[in-house]
Image (spheres, rainbow, N blue to C red):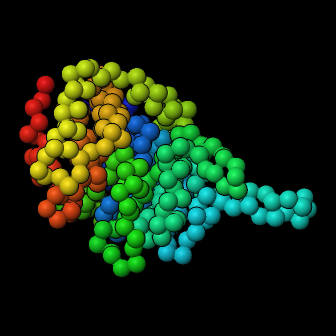
Amino acid sequence: MTIQPQFQAIVDQIGQVVLGKNDQIRMALTCLLAKGHLLIEDIPGIGKTTLAKVLSRSMGLEFRRVQFTSDMLPGDILGSSIFDQNTAAFVFHPGPIFTQVLLADEINRATPKTQSALLEAMEERQVTSDGKTRRLAAPFFVIATQNPLELSGTFPLPESQLDRFLMRIELGYPDREAERRLLGGDRPPHQAVETLEQCLSPENVLELQEQVEAVHVADAVVSYLQDLLEFSRGSRYFHMGLSPRAGLALLHAARSWAFISGRDYVLPEDLQAVINPVVGHRLRSRDDLSEIPAQQLTSFFKEVAVP
């Protein structure tokens, strides 16, 4: 699908480092402009951290990375108050969450208590500590990663935490051509990141996010969205249907995808383009509560009539 030249330039630049993953890069960009948060699930060494770094650098956003571990405490992310002997008062020292792009690396290795420390920040864009609420930077974008195959020592994210992520994507192995370029490159990816140019500024990103919210959604498209939600709730395929929050997530993502595609209105095709990344982590099979493969999920929702 064609996208605006401005965004194609960003995708191309990120694609110089994250090779052969243009579709995933577009989804990550869609998630950012929709004011959502992104969960990347894949095996180690695929390029999850590199994607987060390159995206933040291209968009001109401040970036911080936190490696989640089982002994991490909420204060390690949010910050804590330390007594200052000179002023005889407690002084708050902000944690790494006070940034614009936070990479929560291997989030499922932290305990549920630490994982839940992100909930208020992701939903309200603020942090409450010691009875005081502090606003986070704008834009604020969480990219979390988790490794699905490494089960030892992990704490799977509960449904309430997963629901805070607008999208979940997988990167997958590179194709043969992309991997050959990676193996034959003169510089490793972490060095290539430092040479990338800044395409936008934080102010530009905020302006684009406001423009995405203004993208028109016709009544017929809203009805189609409601049909998708009702299908999930009454279908024999799913354990539980999609919530109203999931419906809003689909709407925001479709608006962003339409905007990146150069339109100021949403088509049913935009909903179809984003439905798997938006609902894949929110739905479970009625038979055994397992996750539903993407191709099967697509075939299920094809049963809903398109206006």
Q: Is residue 192 visible?
A: no
Q: Camera-side residue: 64 or 229?
A: 229
Question: What residue is rendered at 47% in x and 66% in y?
Answer: 112
Quarter that holds the N terminus? top left
Across and down, in percent, residue 248 comes to: 35, 36
Across and down, in percent, residue 97 comes to: 58, 54
Q: Camera-side residue: 173 or 137?
A: 137
Of all residues shown, which one is farthest toward the bottom? 152
* Picture mark count: 0
Question: What residue is rendered at 17% in x and 58% in y?
Answer: 285
Q: Camera-side residue: 56 or 217?
A: 217
Compared with residue 174, is residue 200 higher up or lower down, i.e. above or below?
above
Q: Quadrant of residue 81?
A: bottom right
Q: Is residue 64 visible?
A: yes
Question: What residue is rendered at 62% in x and 64% in y?
Answer: 75
Compared with residue 111, is residue 133 higher up or lower down, i.e. above or below?
above
Of all residues shown, which one is farthest toward the front? 234
Quarter that holds the C terminus? top left
Across and down, in percent, residue 288 comes to: 17, 65
Q: Quadrant of residue 152?
A: bottom left
Across and down, in percent, residue 42 comes to: 30, 63
Question: What residue is rendered at 26% in x and 20% in y?
Answer: 218
Instruction: Indicate left or right for 184 with 83 as reference.
Output: left
Compared with residue 301, is residue 220 higher up or lower down, i.e. above or below?
above
Compared with residue 52, is residue 139 higher up or lower down, i.e. above or below?
above
